Amino acid sequence: MQIIRFLEDKKSKEPKWGWISESQIGLIEGSPFFEFRRKPPDRRLESVSLLPPCRPSKIICVGRNYAAHAAEHDTEVPAIPLLFFKPPSSLVGHGAFIELPPQSEQIEHEAELAVVIGKAGRWIRPETAREYIFGYTIANDVTARDLQREDPQWTRAKGFDSFCPLGPWIETDLDPTDLLIACRVNGQIRQMASTHDMVFNLAHLIAYSSAIMSLQPGDIILTGTPAGVSRILDGDTVSIEIEGIGTLENPVRNAVLPPHLST
Ligand code: ZN
C-alpha cells in the first residue's frame, strides 16, 4: 500500500492521511501508524499538495554507507555506522522547492532510500528489525558540501530548512534488498546504484540506532547515498527514482530572504 500525507489545496492548513489506488486517493481516518480505517478512493492524486509522508521525531542519517561514495570524497568506509541527524524542520514534500541558502557556495543532492519506523523499539535485534519497519520512501539528503568540510559535525551543512525532501509516499510492501536508485538533475543521470551496495544493511542500522535511542513510529533512517553526488543550482530540478517506490521530484531555487537581509 502507498500512504501519503497531503493538503486538499494550496490554501488548506489541515494535513490529511490518504492511500493511493490507481492515481486516486482514499482518505485514512486515524493514523496509519496506529488504528485507522481506509475510505474508498474519491479524489485525484494530481489535485492535492503532497506533504512529507510522515512526521518523524528524528531523522537519523548514515554517512558513507556506499563504498564508491566514500571513495569519491577520499574517505574510508567507517568500521561502524557513522550516524548524524537532520532536524525535522528540514523536511519538505514532493514538488516543494529546495531553497539554496546564501551561506553556501556548493550545495549537493544525495539520493537515499529512507526507512520508516512503524513501532516503538529499543535494543532491537537485527533478526527482528523487519517487524519495526512500516515502509520505505525516498529522501534527498541535501548537503552544503563546503560547510561540511569546515565543520567536524554536520549539523549546519545538513540542517537547513528544505534540505530533506521526502516522499512522494510511503510504500509498505517492498523488498528493499536490491532496488535501483537513480538521481537525475534536469533529466541528466547523476547517481545510479543498487541498495544491495550498502555497507551496513537495514537490519544492522535499525539495531545499531535503537541501541542508542528509542525509535518511534514515523521516525526515519536515511540509509546513505551512492556515488555521483553533484552540485545543484537555482532553476534545477532534482528527480530521485527508487525502483518499487516511485519518483521524488523537487525544483531548486535561491532562498527567499527576509527584508532585512535582502537589500
Ligand atoms: Zn547522506
Image (tube, rainbow, N blue to C red):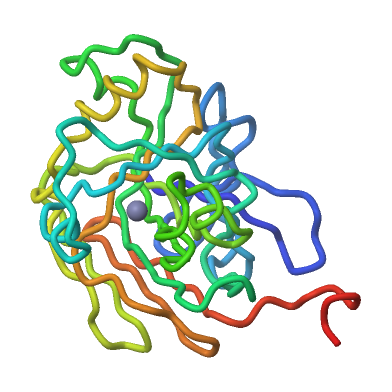
Residue visible at 11% across and 60% down in the picture:
68
- Residue in the foreground of this view, choosing between 102 and 90: 102
The structure residue drawn at horizontal position 36% and vertical position 45%, both measured from the top left corner, is: 222
The picture places residue 17, in percent across and down from the top left corner, at 60, 44
Which residue is farthest top?
A: 123
Percent coordinates x, y for residue 182 in the rendering: 23, 69
Tell how many labels: 0
Estimate the x, y position of residue 107 in percent, counting from the top left. 46, 72
Q: Name the residue nearer the viewer: 245 or 140.
A: 140
Seen in the picture, residue 205 relative to 222 is either above or below; the reply is above
Q: Is residue 125 above or below residue 244?
A: above
Question: 21 above or below 59?
Answer: below
Residue at 44 percent of width and 68 percent of height: 146
95 lies above or below 5: below
From the viewer's side, name the closer residue of 191 and 246.
191
Residue 108 position within the rendered picture, expressed as x and y whole percent measured from the top left: 40, 71
Quarter occupied by residue 39: top right
Q: Nearer the viewer, residue 99 or 30?
A: 99
Placement of the C terminus among the 4 image quadrants: bottom right
Q: Residue at x 12, y 42 (%)?
A: 199
Determine whether, in the image, residue 8 is placed left or right of residue 246.
right
**Residue 140 sits in quarter:** bottom left
Quadrant in which the N terminus is drawn: top left
